[in-house]
Image: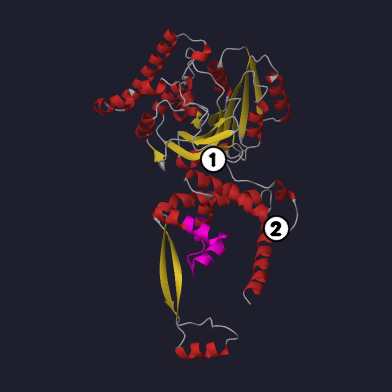
Amino acid sequence: MTPTVSIIVPVYNAQNYLKRCVDSILTQEYTDYELILVNDGSTDASGSICDEYAAEDARIRVIHKENTGVSDTRNIGIDAAAGTYLQFLDSDDWITPDATKLLVRSALEHGCDLVIADFYRVVGERVAHKGDIEEDGVLTKEEFAAHMMENPADFYYGVLWNKLYRRDLIEKYRLRMDTSVSWCEDFLFNLEYILHADVFYALQAPIYYYVKTKGSLASQGMSITKTIKMKLMVFEYYNNFYKNVYDEKDYEKKRLQVYRFFIDAASDGGAPLSILPGGKKLGEERSFVCSGGLSGDGILMESYRSRKLLEHYLEVAALQYDLTLRDVTLLLSFGTLHTVKNRRELADYAGLSVGSLSRSLQKLLSRDLIKLTEIRVKNSASETDIKNAERSARGGLSSLKPSEKYLQIKLLPAAKPILAALTAARNDYDSARFSDFSEEELAAYAALTEKIKQNTLKVLLP
């Protein structure tokens, strides 16, 4: 059966980190893929490690070849691929468990030719979230090229590993890596691909862990003369790309911006690695999970597992839209709760402290995602009924009052894409919980859940 995705990993002397890379692929939530490991003449144990994995998983294919460099190695992987989409990894990096799922979902939902995603940059034990495009929705070629013009030498645009490609486009135009180039070869491939693509989507969730171990041109032993020549050649590709994307008049307007590539490229593609603005300790970039709470038994353990599973999927929406888990949990609660008596009641429903609720509400209000309105609802009962109820009430006020104040919650149009992401997260949550359930088991679960609900209401609403 033809796989939906072909994941291509060039391997060269990667024995110290290859298992981390491959394991991150084999533990993907999305499983309809083939993994092509291309061993580029490794002199360490990398080749045997690849063969061991292939012996255990039929989705893995290993290609052994003489050492010819990463560009030729990737080309061989492309030649061998059978998937509808192509995804690339470097053997010293790894991906999040939801990486392939998020890439494919984006491509299918938006009819994309190219999906580009945020990533994590890893330096030692520190990690930082990196991205560039913050615009929601589908982008045209011109719009995507305009974003790229702002940061032309950024890894975000230049590399292969944070993107998903359509293999039919690659084959139709015979796109391959240029083996004569040893700097920005990924970027040149991307420029050629973008010229033939029409629909682009920026996934604002980090899915890839990039470890800076590759060297600059100088560290490759290339002379200054050859370095300058190489960069001039790459710039000529880049310059011609924009001449093809824009007509002559528009190109002239943007020519100075295009020439910024010279300045950005002078740094060899990166800022000092000792500094990671906004960085976190590796392992803390996503929500924390208590392993003991996941494996134990008991009512609190079960509640904890369910909450952490939901947070696991909600977190993607939070990352995409620069919100916290607390923020998106609150938005999710608004989907079913439209009026409450006060903020304390809302905080209780959302499982937040009043202080945390206030901070999240302020953020959601400032971004025009919600609107809060205080309304007063009049009671339809007569004044006599109210007075009689007050006299018969035991030790407190009657629930019948002339009028009551409520908070009315309205979700605004700006929240629509976030709500769509939350719906997808909820669907993923249900799919994970009910995996391998038969229709009969699902029906039985629904009936028992309703019975538990009614029993609970008898106690809480006497």
Q: Residue furthest left?
A: 249
Quarter of the image with the N terminus is: top right
Q: Would you say the magenta stretch is mainly helix, strand or loop?
A: helix
Location of residue 197 (image quadrant): top left
Residue corresponding to mark 2: 300
Residue 343 part of the magenta-drawn span: yes
In the rendered structure, which amino acid carries the disc numbered 1?
Leu
Q: Give the labeled residue for mark 1.
A: 102
Q: Position of residue 121 (x, y in %)?
A: 53, 32
Residue 223 sits above or below residue 19 on the image: above
Callout 2: few (<14), some (14-19), or many (20+) C-alpha neighbours within 10 Å? few
Q: Residue at x 48, y 65 (%)?
A: 338
Look at the image and give the residue range highlighted in magenta: 331-360
Secondary element at image label 1: helix
Is 321 positioned to the left or the right of 457 in the image?
left
**Along the viewing direction, whichever of 260 and 179 lies nearer the viewer:** 260
Question: Which label sits in the foreground, 2 or 1?
Answer: 2
Q: In what quadrant of the picture does the C terminus appear?
A: bottom right
Q: Position of residue 414 (x, y in %)?
A: 40, 52
Q: Quadrant of residue 348?
A: bottom right
Kind of residue sitting beneath label 2:
Leu
**Callout 2 secondary element:** helix
Left or right of 253 on screen, residue 307: right
What is the spatial separation of the Cα atoms under label 2 and label 1, in whole angstroms?
31 Å
Q: Position of residue 106 (x, y in %)?
A: 49, 40
In screen coordinates, is 231 left or right of 251? right
